[in-house]
Image (spheres, rainbow, N blue to C red):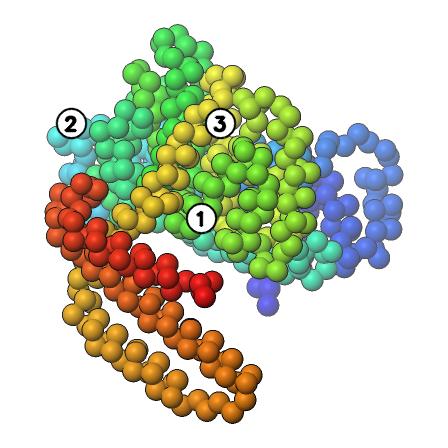
Amino acid sequence: MIRPAQLLRLLKINRTLVKHGLDEIILATHLFRPLRFLLYLAPWNWVRQQREPRAVRIRRALEDLGPIFVKFGQILSTRRDLLPEDIADELARLQDAVPPFPGHLARRIVEQSLGDSVDDMFAAFDETPMASASIAQVHAARLKDGREVIVKVVRPGIANVIRRDVGLLYILADLAERYWSEGRRLRPREVIQEYEKTIFDELDLVREAANASQLRRNFADSELLYVPEVYWPYTRKQVMVMERISGTPIGNVEELRAQGIDMRRLSERGVEIFFTQVFRHNFFHADMHPGNIFVSPGGQYIAVDFGIMGTLSPEDQRYLAENFLAFFNRDYHRVAELHVQSRWVPEGTRIDEFESAIRSVCEPIFERPLKDISFGRLLLHLFQTARRFNMVVQPQLILLQKTLLNIEGLGRQLYPDLDLWQTAKPFLERWTTDHVGPKAFVKALYKTSPQVLEKLPHMPLLLHEALEKIHEGKLAVEFKSRELENIRAEIHKANRRAYGAIGGGVLLILAVVISSWNMENGFSWHAIPLLGWLLGGAGAMVLYNARPGRR
């Protein structure tokens, strides 16, 4: 049921769409198609006039509708798997041109949140904001001990505005799913749900402060990236106090050159930071546009604004790394296999058809020099191709693709000849070696040895019970024909293989447990005792002899 306030807002939205000449989009939907003749009756359509491109009109309409719709457009611009390219590019130009709220209101919010007067907590507090955005604004301040800080304050009443406009977006999404031919495929409700989660997460400054602290810890003592310190005693849900940084905005290329900064090295460091976050820390800054990145005089990156962060599951990390390597080796069959194995596409997808679709998209790309190939565009083309095979694109992969596009754009703005693949390939190959194969298997066994030691005393009883059940199951079968005798022989072989598999497994576990006693200072091949090698070898032989294909 639409409430009166929502109805008024909906009328304003319709008026804004008509103002920007978007009535044709509304009347093109299935619901309103019978009313298309109204376009010819509208006076403003009687005189032919030159209209701006569709994408520009959509961007300006969102700007007129206010900060929540601007924010929605910014997030929607990252869904290049759903939008036409011209609209996605135009939405990416949206900026938070929001007037600041009065400084005395910011002061009041700080005092209410922290339970003390600003004068008692700060040596200085500037009521004129340094920057203002749709969710919050930032003020300069100085602590009593002389440290320069920034105070981020959530805009008053913004939560209610967000709830109202998100409610309207859900209504529009429902109408789109019902009456728009592309509605079901594009799943607008899921897009709105993703937006709702993102924007409400940004309202919680404690969450943003925790993100900043984690990222700062990940890059502690690193020359690549500096993250400002959060001052937790002054941080609440609506207020965050953080170290004030100084640096050159990364978009100011001329100033960076004037400072004598090596632009090639700076661009390569950006790529290294991205892959370090994604594949080593599994925690990446997902809003790395030029406004959120500065450069110190020594060439170190400085990041701000930690409201949107991304993570990947270990499975997604592995499949992503292998996908990149397979792509650049032009092994499209492996790419198709990985998509099916990871369940990014439905299980019944024909690998040969998927492989052919990927090849038709990627071969024209790889005809160009590697330095001209965009990783982000490659992911985008992959998502668009996989969508034809009913791929459901996960939100974390969308964040990754958006971040990669930002990093590439920055890198090539700094150094146009940046070969991103040359920087990334050794990193990916090193990660794959460390996480896939025998070395990774042994490391995993060593890591799980405490749990094995804990459960080892129960193993003999569990083994006895398992063997007893197998034995009882065999005796319960009666055989009265040659066919049944053959089945009996197969069951007997299967039982033998089960005994062998259990015995071989026990020997391998004992080998790991015995070896772990000599590895208090970390894993080393030389620290494995002779008994460990013997038990491991015996277990491997038993398992080999128990394999299903052996007669």
Rendered image: mark on residue 421: 3
For marks 1 and 2, the one nearer the N-term is 2
Q: In which quarter of the image is residue 48?
A: top right
Question: Total marks drawn?
Answer: 3
Q: In the visual, does 266 lie left or right of 404?
A: left
Which kind of residue does numbered mark 3 sit on? Trp
Q: In which quarter of the image is residue 287?
A: top left
Q: In the visual, does 315 lie left or right of 364?
A: left
The residue positioned 54% from the left and 32% from the top of the image is 328
Q: Is residue 206 visible?
A: no
Residue that carries the numbered disc 1 in the rendered image: 316
Which kind of residue does numbered mark 1 sit on? Asp
User: Is the C terminus in the top left, top right, bottom left or bottom right quadrant?
Assistant: bottom left
The mark closer to the camera, 2 or 3, is 3
Marks 1/3: CA–CA distance: 20 Å
The residue positioned 15% from the left and 38% from the top of the image is 120
Q: Quadrant of residue 60?
A: top right
| Residue 145 placement (x, y as % from top left) | 12, 30
Which kind of residue does numbered mark 2 sit on? Gly
| Residue 262 placement (x, y as % from top left) | 38, 12
User: Is the N terminus in the top left, top right, bottom left or bottom right quadrant?
Assistant: bottom right
Q: In the visual, does 18 lie left or right of 228?
A: right
Q: Do the residues labelled 2 and 3 touch (CB within 8 Å)?
A: no
| Residue 428 placement (x, y as % from top left) | 42, 35
Rendered image: mark on residue 146: 2
